[in-house]
């Protein structure tokens, strides 16, 4: 009996890995549809997706001017910190919130085509990486207004974005399957992300915690944020930040692979 279940799960694991491999190879599918999603959303709009950049820019300016006074921080130091934090948080939180409906929203395609499930998650992550890409314009403008020395560490921004995207993939798969089975989880995730925003050093600096730094040491969002922020701001703990972020990525992908292998075949029936 044990061998039966062992062989059965091994086959499911192979199917799950095959699903991921086929999805990665189907760049034409999720790459094109990711662009199409953005064009469709902002069709007939004058600014198009730049509306997101404009609204984020206004938010950075408003919060930056206010909170630099509240925290008694120099504007030239605080505004670049805030700009990178808000833009990166927008990428992370949007991926997580949209992951809850990634399979529900693709119900017709999943039921009528044999497109691997992971491709729908890659489409979601790619779409938000594109938005993140043009939101970096805000960071460029802030850096132009408040010039800073950019060192070799800036080249680490690309691997940092790749790590954030990989974490978005496993979170998208995990939440996509879970929320397809339990639809109420989407509301819970939305509320958790609102709380996580205030618990994560997006608009405040982790140094204010002083002896209570453990409050962010166990916060995975902190490392995802710092992985993109430290290369541009010259953080002194790049090795530790990237090491923990890479570990988070490996553990997340491994756990999600087992979870996805167990329930992948049921997603179409739960829709």
Image (cartoon, rainbow, N blue to C red):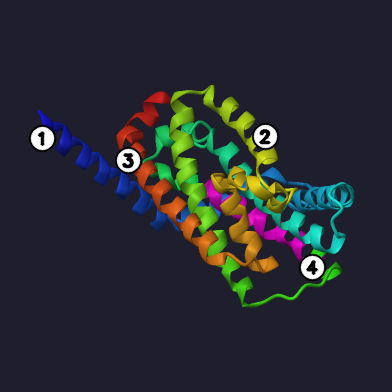
Give the position of the C terminus as an image quadrant.
top left
Q: Earlier in the sequence, mark 1 or mark 4?
A: 1
Mark 1: which secondary structure?
helix
What residue did someone put label 2 on? Answer: 194
Image quadrant where residue 160 sits: bottom right
Classify residue 16 as left or right of residue 270: left
Residue 117 x/y as whole percent: 41, 41
Res. 162 mark: none
Q: Residue at x 12, y 31 (%)?
A: 2
Q: Residue at x 68, y 67 (%)?
A: 232
Q: Please say if the residues under marks 3 and 1 sit with CB atoms less than 8 Å apart.
A: no
Given residues 71 and 175, the one toward you in this image is 71
- Within 10 Å of disc 3 (Cα), the crowding (few <14, some 14-19, many 20+) is some
Q: Which residues are magenta?
A: 122-141
Mark 2: which secondary structure?
helix
Query: Is residue 131 on the magenta stretch?
Result: yes
Image quadrant where residue 269 sits: top left
| Spatial CA span between label 3 and label 1 | 18 Å
Classify residue 23 as left or right of residue 3: right
Q: Earlier in the sequence, mark 4 or mark 3?
A: 4
Res. 258 mark: 3
Mark 3: which secondary structure?
helix
What residue did someone put label 1 on? Answer: 3
Residue 230 x/y as whole percent: 64, 63
Residue 90 visible in the current orientation: no
């Amino acid at each position: 009996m044990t061998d039966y279940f062992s062989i059965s799960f091994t086959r499911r694991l192979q199917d799950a890995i095959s699903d991921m491999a086929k999805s990665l190879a189907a760049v034409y599918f999720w790459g094109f549809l990711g662009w199409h999603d953005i064009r469709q959303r902002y069709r007939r709009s004058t600014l198009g997706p730049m509306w997101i950049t404009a609204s984020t820019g206004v938010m950075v300016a408003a919060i930056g001017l206010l909170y630099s006074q509240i925290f008694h921080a120099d504007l030239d130091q605080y505004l670049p910190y805030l700009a990178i934090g808000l833009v990166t948080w927008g990428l992370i939180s949007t991926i997580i919130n949209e992951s809850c409906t990634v399979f529900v929203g693709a119900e017709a395609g999943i039921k009528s085509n044999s497109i691997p499930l992971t491709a729908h998650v890659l489409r979601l992550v790619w779409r938000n990486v594109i938005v993140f890409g043009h939101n970096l314009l805000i960071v460029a403008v802030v850096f132009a207004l408040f010039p800073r020395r950019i060192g070799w560490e800036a080249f680490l921004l690309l691997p940092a974005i790749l790590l954030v995207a990989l974490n978005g993939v496993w979170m998208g798969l995990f939440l996509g399957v879970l929320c397809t089975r339990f639809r109420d989880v989407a509301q819970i995730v939305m509320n958790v992300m609102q709380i996580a925003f205030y618990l994560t050093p997006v608009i405040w600096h982790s140094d204010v915690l002083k002896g209570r730094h453990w409050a962010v040491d166990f916060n995975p969002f902190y490392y995802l944020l710092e992985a993109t922020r430290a290369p541009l701001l010259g953080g002194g703990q790049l090795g530790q930040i990237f090491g923990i972020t890479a570990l988070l990525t490996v553990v997340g992908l491994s756990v999600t692979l087992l979870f996805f292998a167990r329930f992948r075949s049921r997603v179409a029936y739960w829709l």
